[in-house]
């Protein structure tokens, strides 16, 4: 499985930000109230990010200790943590980008919005960033070190059959 690319996360965040901005613009054109995300959303996203890192810790410890561990980490568990980390980084970019679009729309209006209307969206942006960063850290923690068999290869060598 390949690591999550920064370009993928940036493109998801940009598309979500444009969608958030456009949604608020459409709501304003119909004279409907602007969309405000709840403050607990940002806090929950941050807690999910911390939980993903905590789930990756046993995999990281096993990768450092090597084969001398009494009870190895289940490879299915490690795979699940990596997949969860990849999905969390995408969701963090999506939620954070969408909330950023809402904040940008609110701040570009002629009347400056109150703190009570912008703070929940700013907290959601922060939660999305925390979730994305924690998920990328957890994904990096699950990278397995090279096998001892690779030490026998010459520098820059490959494992091709002759």
Image (cartoon, rainbow, N blue to C red):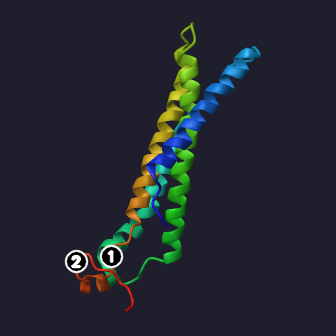
Locate residue 34, reporting x and y percent: 67, 20
Q: Which mark is residue 35?
A: none
- Give yes or no for contact between labels 1 and 2 (Cβ–Cβ under 8 Å): no
Within 10 Å of disc 2 (Cα), the crowding (few <14, some 14-19, many 20+) is: few
Q: Is residue 100 left or right of residue 57?
A: right
User: Farthest top residue?
Assistant: 111
Residue 68 drawn above or below residue 30? below
Q: Is residue 99 shown above or below 86? A: above
Of residues 86 and 64, the one drawn nearer to the viewer in this rendering: 86
Q: Quadrant of the C terminus?
A: bottom left
Q: Looking at the image, is 33 positioned above or below residue 45? A: above
Question: Which quarter of the figure has residue 68?
Answer: bottom left
Residue located farthest toward the left when viewing the structure as drawn:
155
On the picture, is 100 further left or further right than 66?
A: right
Using the rendered image of the protein, determine whether residue 47 is visible from the camera's viewpoint.
no
Q: Which residue is mark 2?
A: 155
Identity of the residue drawn at 46% across and 62% down? 55
- Give x and y (percent) for residue 58: 40, 68
Q: Residue furthest right?
A: 30
- Up-down relation of residue 155 to residue 82 (above or below): below
Q: Which mark is residue 146?
A: 1
* Residue occupying image coordinates x 42% and y 47%: 133
- Whether residue 142 is visible: yes
Q: In what element is the residue under mark 1?
A: loop
């Amino acid at each position: 499985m390949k690591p999550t690319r920064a370009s993928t996360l940036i493109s998801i965040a940009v598309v979500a930000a444009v969608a958030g901005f456009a949604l608020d613009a459409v709501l304003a054109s119909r004279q409907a109230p602007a969309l405000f995300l709840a403050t607990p959303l940002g806090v929950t996203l941050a807690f999910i990010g911390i939980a993903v890192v905590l789930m990756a810790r046993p995999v990281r410890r096993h990768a450092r200790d090597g084969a001398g561990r009494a009870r190895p980490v289940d490879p299915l568990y490690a795979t699940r943590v990596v997949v969860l980390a990849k999905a969390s980084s995408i969701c963090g970019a999506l939620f954070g980008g969408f909330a950023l679009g809402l904040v940008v729309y609110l701040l570009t209006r002629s009347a400056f919005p109150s703190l009570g209307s912008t703070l929940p969206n700013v907290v959601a942006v922060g939660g999305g960033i925390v979730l994305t960063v924690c998920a990328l850290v957890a994904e990096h923690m699950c990278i397995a070190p090279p096998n001892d068999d690779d030490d026998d290869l010459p520098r820059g060598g490959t494992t091709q059959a002759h």
